[in-house]
Image (spheres, rainbow, N blue to C red):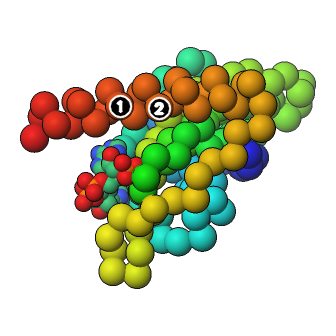
Amino acid sequence: MIVLTQVMLPQDTNSAGNVHGGTIMKLADNAAFVVASRHCRTNVVTASVDRIDFLAPVYTGDLLILHARLNWTGHASMEIGIKIDSEDLFSGTVRHVATALLTFVSLDEKGRPIQVPPLILESDEDRMIFEEAAQRASIRQETREREI
Ligand SMILES: CC(C)(COP(=O)(O)OP(=O)(O)OC[C@H]1O[C@@H](n2cnc3c(N)ncnc32)[C@H](O)[C@@H]1OP(=O)(O)O)[C@@H](O)C(=O)NCCC(=O)NCCS
């Protein structure tokens, strides 16, 4: 699990002060990249973003807090789950503003997918999260095979 924080500045927002979804997506990708890199210590790339739901607005001056964890490992791919909160730095109020699921793939020096280290499951919660992510990975694969 890693926590990435960043204060939202005017360049991150529209003219009304709402933070762009793309700003949040880029930070989610960065946070997932760190989790995947630390797990594999190889080159890792984003393969897909399942979905990202923006549940509440984020404004200029808010602190964005991204909690990223490794949910599941397959052969060369991994799912990283991100919970995104915002903190109003004046009031201290923290709100859950978005959730994202990303799949990263580990690559060797020639850019080919390479086996990732297995995820060590230490708790019942880890096992439950792993199982749910495994089901999503299987659905993702079936969907891709249908679309190709
Ligand atoms: C992701 C990528 C490496 C997969 O390469 P590939 O030759 O299709 O790999 P494979 O079919 O052998 O699949 C390798 C693994 O990736 C997974 N995978 C491939 N495409 C995927 C996708 N779109 N979403 C989720 N997982 C995917 C496979 O399920 C497989 O998982 P497993 O090894 O755990 O069973 C390749 O498509 C790529 O390089 N894409 C561009 C990545 C990039 O540049 N990202 C930055 C944003 S542009």
Q: How many marks?
A: 2
Q: Quadrant of ligand 1?
A: bottom left
From the viewer's side, name the closer residue of 114 and 82.
114
* Residue type at the position of mark 2: Ala
* Residue type at the position of mark 1: Ser
Rendered residue at 22%/30% (across/down): 143
Q: Which residue is mark 2?
A: 134
Would residue 35 appear left or right of 106 to someone viewing this image?
Answer: right
Q: Quadrant of the N terminus?
A: top right
Rendered residue at 33%/80% (across/down): 110
From the viewer's side, name the closer residue of 134 and 85.
134
- To which quarter of the image does residue 138 belong? top left
Which numbered dot is residue 138?
A: 1
From the viewer's side, name the closer residue of 120 and 110.
120
Would residue 59 appear left or right of 80 to someone viewing this image?
Answer: right
Q: Secondary structure at mark 1?
A: helix
Q: Is residue 38 visible?
A: yes
**Residue 118 place in picture, x, y as percent:** 59, 52
Q: Secondary structure at mark 2?
A: helix
Rendered residue at 60%/19% (across/down): 56
Q: How far, Cα to Cα, is label 2 from label 1? A: 6 Å
- Reply above or below: 15 against 117: above
